[in-house]
Amino acid sequence: MKEKLLAIIPARGGSKRIPNKNIRNFFGKPLIAHTILQAKENSFIDRVVVDTDSPKIAAIAKKYGAEAPFLRPKRLAADKASVNDSAVYFLKRLKKEEGCEPEYVIFLHTTSPLREQKDINECWEFIKESGATTVLTVCSTHPRLYYLDAQNKIILANSPGGKLPSNVQQWRKAYILNGCFVYIVKTSALLKEKDIFTSDTRAVICDKWRSVDLDTPEDWVLAEYLYKHKDKLTKEIKSFK
C-alpha cells in the first residue's frame, strides 16, 4: 500500500501526572477521540492509526474510527523511551506486516486539544511547497531565557559572555515547539536519520494561547477553560488587530 499521508497518533498507557490521560473525559469524549475525529476529517490523510501499548486505548481508538494494528512493545512505552525509536519501529513493522509505505507521516498528539484544522492544513501545504523533510508547529516565546543554578542564582542562558540589547523589541524573535501540535515528516528521511527532527526541518507559527500541552493537572484545567471559551477568545483577540 503506497499511501501518501499516514496519520499516527501516539498514545502511551502510562501517564503518572494525569492518570489515564489519553482516555480521560474531555468535553464529552475520551481525549484521544478528539484527535482521531480531527484526523479523519481531512481528505488528504489516507489512514489514521494509533500507536499504543494499551489494549484499552486501542479498543477506544477503534470505537472512534482509528486503526490500532498492533501494540507497542513495553520497552518503547517506558517513561524514558524515545519518541524517535517508537516511530521508526512502528513504520518498519507496518511495512513488514502490511507492506504499507507512506510517503509522509503526520504525528498528531492527543495532548494538544486546541489544535485546529487550519494548523494541519498549513503544515501539509508547506511541506509540499517547500521541499522540507519535516514541518512542525511552534509558538512565540520570550527571547530572554534564564536558568537557575543549585542556589537559585539567575543565569542568562542565551548570552554566554556577551551583552544583549536592553530593549526587548531589538531582540530576535524566539519560538518553542508548542506541545506537538503537528509534525509532518517525509518517511524516507525519518527512517534514514532516525529522528523526527530531520536535517531540513521548518516551522509553521501557531497562536500562543492555543499552544497548551497536557502534561500536568494545571495544563488540563487551563485547556478545558480555553477550549470552552475558544470562540469568544478568538473574537476578542482579533478585535485588537
Image (cartoon, rainbow, N blue to C red):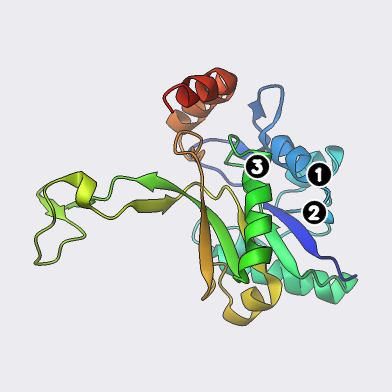
- Residue at figure coordinates x 59%, y 21% from the top left: 231
Q: Is 168 displayed left or right of 21 in the figure?
A: left
> Tag on residue 118?
3
Compared to residue 212, the image places residue 10 above or below, namely below
Whole-percent x, y for residue 144 in the image: 22, 50
Q: Secondary structure at mark 2?
A: loop
> Tag on residue 45?
2
Precedes in sequence: disc 2 or disc 3: 2
- Residue at figure coordinates x 49%, y 37% from the top left: 212
Nearer the observer: mark 2 or 3; the answer is 3
Q: Which residue is mark 1?
A: 40
Quarter holding the N terminus is bottom right
Whole-percent x, y for residue 89 in the image: 69, 71
The amino acid type, in three-letter code, at marker 2 is Ile
Please indicate, yes or no, whether residue 199 appears anywhere in the rendered image.
yes
The amino acid type, in three-letter code, at marker 3 is Lys
The outermost residue toward the front is 241
The answer to whether mark 1 and mark 2 are in CB contact below 8 A is yes
